[in-house]
């Protein structure tokens, strides 16, 4: 019996030892056999751009459109009433910057023949740096301080990256834009995987300079002087020999294709839950009612392009009410069939802009108004408005048949003008707004026109509004956060839980230093 007990005890110890031993089941043991674990560089580039273009979801796309009151929510109103919930940034880092950083790192080393046919090192690095800077600007403008210098460094053992101050992030963004621009060469192999410009590095240089103008102005609160760093960077980009975007042909647009499984992300939003805001509608009509949040008093036919009825007669939904609050205030929701955002913008195949000539001219108008340049404010403003009208016509009206939201969404007459006078309507509106400068001031008129021109580009518009204060938006009546239009997004829960030390340090860059949507980020302080 003693021998049997001894044997059983030995077997138990042996079994326990086996269960605790490290066992190599092979590198592929826990892999999805149908998954993709490697990719070529052109696919990394196109994938990063596609993912950025398709950043759907409230945290990535719709919240900023609601914050600047382009649209109003009808039933589910948490976002438009500023509910304070954690946001998200994983797609920016994991799906976009991670791929772009790998391209930069690998092409900075030995370039194999297989890599070389996908693009020269100069061009693959150049485009990747420019686009990564664009992505990072979105991140820091939304959240404030954020990981950058230590981000995408897991191969170096960095799993909990530090947060760089927003000032440091902006410094690196400017450097990446300039380094990327200056690296590009039209005499070497064009970059493959470029879904924006098809490998045209001349246009990428203009895009880089145009983004630099935008970045410089975004720092105007911190550096308002005509001799400060912001004005210096603005002028350096404007005078760069590569030029800036001045024509519609040089604009940066994302082209979507539902048949190729690349639909416009707005198409996933349920149209019945949203209406164009009455504030936007009345501002474009130029009414004298309290809903007009601008100084405009001239009918702006861009309203026709923005709504689903292609009409100047819609009413829009008053912004900032809960369902009960809307009824108590004596309002009701107008028809979603006509008062919602046009299918021209939210159709599965609708294009979406990244940077336009009109916006670039409006940035030049603002810089001139601030005394940063000697350009003519009125001329820059007029060109910015007219070009915005024209690019809307080019991208959203592809046939001359009558518009019909059911059968011919791409039809309708041009809003810019007539066949004989192609810009007559745009010219008349621009002239009226130039005249408004005398009564209301250049910075106000320019800021309001940026709001109109950036329709559907909520993130950039929200950044502009936080910086300039134009238009004069009023907080939601039934706000859930005490009545403050959000100044930022709240950091992701993953950061709070798994990178808590660096997360807590980052809060010191906010004013006040709490992770709230009411706190201001560096360039907003």
Image (cartoon, grey):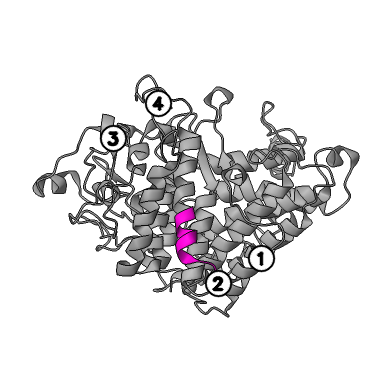
- From which residue to which does the magenta span run? 373-383
Q: Is residue 124 above or below residue 264?
A: below
- Distance from disc 2 to disc 4, alpha carbons, whole Å, reads 43 Å
Secondary structure state at the residue bearing disc 3: loop
- Distance from disc 1 to disc 3, alpha carbons, whole Å, reads 41 Å
- Distance from disc 4 to disc 1, alpha carbons, whole Å, reads 41 Å
Kindly identify the residue that appears in the image at 52 percent across and 80 percent down: 225
Secondary structure state at the residue bearing disc 1: loop
Mark 3 is surrounded, within 10 Å at the Cα level, by few (under 14), some (14 to 19) or many (20 or more) other residues, namely some
Tag nearer the camera, 1 or 2: 2
Which residue is tagged 3?
Answer: 311
Q: Earlier in the sequence, mark 2 or mark 3?
A: 3
Q: Give the farthest residue toward the front.
A: 420
Secondary structure state at the residue bearing disc 2: loop
Front residue (pair 484, 184): 184
Mark 4 is surrounded, within 10 Å at the Cα level, by few (under 14), some (14 to 19) or many (20 or more) other residues, namely many
Which residue is tagged 2?
Answer: 374
Going by the image, does 79 lie left or right of 423? Answer: left
Which residue is tagged 1?
Answer: 239
Q: Earlier in the sequence, mark 2 or mark 4?
A: 2
Q: Are marks 2 and 4 in contact (CB under 8 Å)?
A: no
Mark 1 is surrounded, within 10 Å at the Cα level, by few (under 14), some (14 to 19) or many (20 or more) other residues, namely few
Secondary structure state at the residue bearing disc 4: loop
Which residue is tagged 4?
Answer: 409
Q: Are marks 2 and 3 in contact (CB under 8 Å)?
A: no
Q: Earlier in the sequence, mark 1 or mark 3?
A: 1
């Amino acid at each position: 019996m003693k021998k049997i007990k001894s044997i059983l005890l030995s077997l138990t110890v042996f079994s326990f030892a086996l269960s605790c031993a490290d066992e190599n089941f092979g590198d592929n043991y826990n892999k999805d056999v149908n998954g993709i674990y490697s990719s070529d560089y052109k696919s990394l580039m196109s994938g990063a751009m596609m993912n950025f273009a398709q950043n759907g979801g409230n945290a990535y796309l719709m919240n900023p459109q609601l914050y600047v009151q382009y649209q109003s929510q009808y039933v589910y109103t948490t976002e438009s009433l500023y509910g304070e919930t954690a946001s998200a940034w994983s797609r920016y880092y994991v799906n976009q910057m991670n791929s772009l950083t790998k391209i930069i790192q690998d092409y900075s080393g030995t370039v194999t023949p297989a890599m070389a046919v996908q693009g020269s090192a100069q061009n693959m690095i150049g485009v990747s740096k420019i686009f990564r800077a664009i992505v990072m600007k979105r991140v820091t403008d939304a959240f404030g301080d954020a990981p950058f210098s230590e981000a995408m460094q897991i191969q170096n053992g960095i799993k909990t990256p530090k947060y760089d101050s927003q000032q440091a992030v902006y410094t690196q963004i400017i450097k990446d834009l300039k380094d990327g621009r200056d690296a590009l060469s039209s005499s070497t192999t064009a970059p493959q995987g470029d879904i924006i410009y098809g490998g045209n590095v001349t246009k990428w240089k203009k895009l880089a300079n145009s983004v630099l103008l935008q970045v410089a102005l975004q720092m105007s609160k911190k550096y308002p002087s005509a001799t400060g760093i912001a004005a210096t960077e603005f002028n350096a980009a404007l005078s760069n020999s590569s030029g800036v975007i001045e024509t519609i042909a040089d604009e940066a647009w994302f082209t979507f294709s539902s048949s190729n499984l690349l639909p416009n992300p707005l198409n996933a939003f349920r149209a019945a839950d949203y209406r164009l805001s009455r504030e936007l509608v009345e501002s474009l009509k130029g009414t004298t009612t309290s809903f007009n949040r601008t100084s405009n008093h001239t009918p702006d036919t861009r309203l026709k392009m923005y709504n689903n009825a292609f009409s100047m007669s819609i009413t829009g939904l008053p912004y900032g009410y809960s369902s009960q609050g809307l009824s108590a205030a004596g309002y009701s929701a107008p028809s979603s069939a006509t008062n919602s955002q046009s299918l021209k913008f939210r159709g599965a195949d609708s294009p979406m802009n990244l940077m336009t000539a009109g916006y670039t001219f409006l940035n030049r108008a603002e810089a001139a108004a601030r005394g940063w340049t000697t350009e003519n404010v009125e001329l820059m403003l007029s060109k910015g408005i007219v070009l915005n009208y024209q690019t809307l016509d080019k991208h959203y009206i592809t046939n001359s048949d009558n518009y019909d939201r059911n059968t011919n969404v791409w039809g309708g007459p041009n809003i810019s003008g007539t066949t004989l006078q192609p810009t007559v309507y745009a010219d008349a509106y621009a002239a009226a707004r130039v005249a408004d400068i005398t009564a209301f001031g250049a910075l106000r008129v320019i800021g309001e026109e940026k709001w109109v021109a950036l329709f559907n580009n909520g993130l950039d518009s929200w950044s502009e509004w936080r910086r300039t204060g134009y238009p004069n938006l009023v907080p939601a009546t039934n706000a859930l956060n005490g009545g403050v239009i959000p100044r930022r997004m709240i950091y992701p829960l993953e950061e709070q839980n798994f990178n808590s030390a660096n997360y807590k340090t980052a809060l010191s860059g906010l004013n006040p230093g709490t992770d709230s949507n009411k706190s201001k980020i560096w360039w907003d302080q």
